[in-house]
Image (spheres, rainbow, N blue to C red):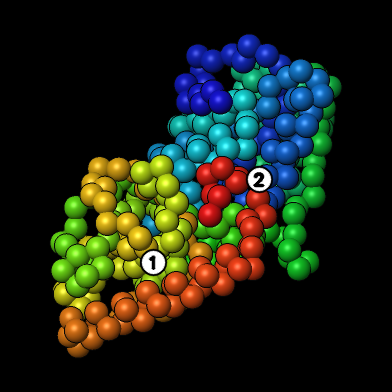
Amino acid sequence: MRYVTDWMNYRSEKETAVTLGKFDGVHRGHQKLIRRVRELAEENGWDSAIYTFDTSQGLPAGQKLLLTSDERQEVFRELSVDLVMACPFTQALKGMEAEDFVREILAERLRARAVIVGPDFRFGKDRKGSPEMLEELSSRYGFSLEVLPKEQEMGVDISSSRIRRETEAGHLEKAASLLGYPFFLSGKIVRGRHLGHSLGFPTINLVPDEHKLLPPNGVCLSRTFVDGKWFDSISNIGCKPTVNGDALGVETHLLGCSNELYGENALVVLLTFTRPEKKFASLDELKEQIGKDLDGAKSYFARQRAEKENIPSEMQNILSV
């Protein structure tokens, strides 16, 4: 997969089928667009392409993302896309007239022969561009247009904002159903305060990206990929109030693993939210609760394997939990 951020100095070597959008979460609706792009590219010998914005830059204050820029890039790779053009959201792009966008980016840079969008897609200065405008311009700039209906679940449109609400409420199974894969976070393992180790439950520690959306502070059952292996795990999101912690972190206990993993990259898949964060009266009380959490986790994973649950997703490689 080619990942391009310098769009002004890029021209695709091949003609493309392209879809466009923010793609926060790369949820089932986004995957529907990407599948169609891949189909058309394979049928015609084109490259499959995504045009989007670089989410690592220019976020409004307080806005959170379902996927960081690096996570989204990895999901695109797992979806077997040939080309991703992720443009910094500069003033030049903000001020680009809609037809200029079609001519300069779709026609000249991406050499688009087919464009696939959703019904609410908007582009160009003041968001004046629409699917109707793309249809009007398609013959002039040599591409066909397909407008796909929104993907729905239970008669309601699937959207990134809907998934954010479910995630923030701790409804991880619902969020996974809408995403098409379980909610996850990733990062480099850092040194913590060794509290878990002293209590007999060693953990790995991740500091989440400041723009990463997270479930409520509390305990989740999880699956973690690190050091080339998947582990059943329990993850705590929060600030460790029992020991007067104040920095938000994600602390994960890997069942059956006590290796030194500092500096390794880890992928933590959050499967189900089990309880909110709580300040315990003593470390002994905390240790007792962790033991109960561990027992519950073992039962959960044993039941899951007995039922042979699978992830209904195209992203089996990255999320084959």
| Residue 62 picture location, percent across and down | 39, 57
Secondary structure type for disc 2: loop
Q: Label 1 belongs to which residue?
A: 234
In the foreground, 30 or 91: 30
Could you tell me which residue is drawn at 16 percent across and 74 percent down?
244
Q: CA distance from mark 1 to mark 2?
A: 25 Å
Q: Is residue 290 visible?
A: yes
Q: Is residue 174 above or below residue 285?
A: above
- Furthest-top residue in this view: 13
Earlier along the polypeptide chain: callout 1 or callout 2?
A: 1
Q: Quadrant of residue 287?
A: bottom left
> Residue 314 got which mark?
2
Secondary structure type for disc 1: strand
User: Exactly how many numbered labels are in the figure?
Assistant: 2
Left or right of residue 192: residue 24: right
Specify the quadrant that holds the N terminus.
top right
Mark 1, residues whose alpha carbon is within 10 Å: few (<14), some, or many (≥20)? many
| Residue 308 picture location, percent across and down | 64, 63
| Residue 280 picture location, percent across and down | 24, 84
Mark 2, residues whose alpha carbon is within 10 Å: few (<14), some, or many (≥20)? some
| Residue 5 picture location, percent across and down | 47, 26
Could you tell me which residue is drawn at 30 percent across and 68 percent down?
238
Amino acid found under the numbered disc labelled 2: Glu
In the foreground, 228 or 54: 228
Could you tell me which residue is drawn at 54 percent across and 49 percent down?
319
